[in-house]
Image (cartoon, rainbow, N blue to C red):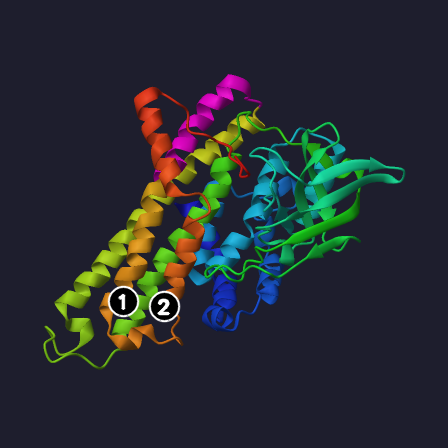
Amino acid sequence: MTRVTDAVARFTAVFDDVGRDAVARELDRRLPHAEVAALRDAGFTRVTVPEESGGGGEPPSVLFALLAELGRRDPNLAQLLRSHFSFVDRTILAAPSAERNRRLEMLAGGAIVGNATHERSTAKVGSLSTTLTASPDGLRLDGTKFYSTGTLFADVVSVAAQDEDGALVAALVPTAASGVDVVDDWRGFGQRLTGSGTTVFRSVRVDERAVSRRVVGGPSHGGAFVQLVLLAAVAGIGRAIVDDAVAFVRNRTRTYSHASAATAREDPLVQETIGRLSGLSFAADSALTAAAAGVDGSVAAQRAGVDGDDLREIIAPIEAATARAQLVVLPSVLEAATLLFEVGGASAVDTGLALDRHWRNARTLASHNPVAFKARAIGDLLLNDTPVPGWWSTGEA
């Protein structure tokens, strides 16, 4: 754990700084542009970029540990960087090329990458309405995306589209490019500051070098990676619940006539509740750590040239572990977010404390990839040896 401990110590000051006004941001719905810039300036956005390319060189397991600590301060910040760190991971594992070198240089320079993958369109599952087509002056991108998490804060955005042959591609586009419109219209009741709204592309010119083919179905830990980012954010919420419960009880002077002690902090029933909250957070942390450990091995194997069925054998248990982690992290933290209110009376529901944000944020994160599907997948794995799906998409049936 020394590497994790050292990394957390290195970023604790900036995490504390960006988390200091998290409740006020939540209440005022102030987008964290300054906080994202502070994380960039501190080197956090390049923490997994290889050292030889100018980054921090940390493995995925350290990243997830850091994201949990960032989520402890503000889970919006942890989630909005999900696509950025996923892009870094894909770039590290890409075949050597001039474009790969260019992208690593861009990331080492502090560029932040956003997301434009999912749509609210009538395209069928596995298809997209966003298109990349040839024009007399080059490639043009057209389409509308939703759930564009992080793009409001990004320098470039990775856009999932279909080309004229129907192939799935990813196009890297500057967010300031002509024809790109990033809209702050996310209206979810939780994770309100992630910029997860609409991005519109109207005849956006795309550099041919910035287009890559999307390979779906091949062995990749990419699906587990993006899910683990969300689980890290939720585990961070679990830690914040314990922090807020302890602070609330320590500062509480009023008690009840039928209470079991003269003060809340001495009341065995309150102490029991705090202990249960700590146990639920511990379960979430443990599941996250166990699932995240395997991704390091996958990265090392791929950088050593392992591919095909050999790589698939390495990744299969990572997918299963990540699915199992969802079955622990999400219900544990959601239970804790409700149990939290047992430590106090009506004063705990004061809007100034915003303790309800923990349930709203955890519930929103848990809704991204419904846990029921993962429980069924694990059951199918155990009963029928069916691999846990590594990739999934949304659309009309």
Residue visible at 53% across and 25% down in the picture = 219
Kind of residue indicated by mark 1: Phe
Q: Quadrant of residue 256?
A: bottom left
State the separation of the CA atoms marked 2 and 1. Answer: 8 Å
Residue visible at 61% across and 66% down in the picture = 34
- x and y, in percent, of residue 16 in the image: 47, 65
Quarter of the figure with the N terminus: top left
Q: Is residue 110 visible?
A: no
Which SS type dominates the magenta stretch? helix
Kind of residue indicated by mark 2: Leu
Q: Quadrant of residue 40?
A: bottom right
Judging depth in this view, the residue of 391 and 268 nearest the camera is 391
| Label 2 crowd bin: few (<14), some (14–19), many (20+), radius 10 Å | many
Q: Which mark is residue 341?
A: 1
- x and y, in percent, of residue 142 in the image: 74, 44
In the visual, does 55 lie left or right of 391?
right
Q: Which residues are magenta?
A: 305-324
Magenta highlight on residue 322 = yes
Judging depth in this view, the residue of 333 and 18 nearest the camera is 333
* Residue 11 against residue 213 in the figure, above or below: below
Task: Give the residue number, with chain letter if any, for mark 2.
Answer: 355
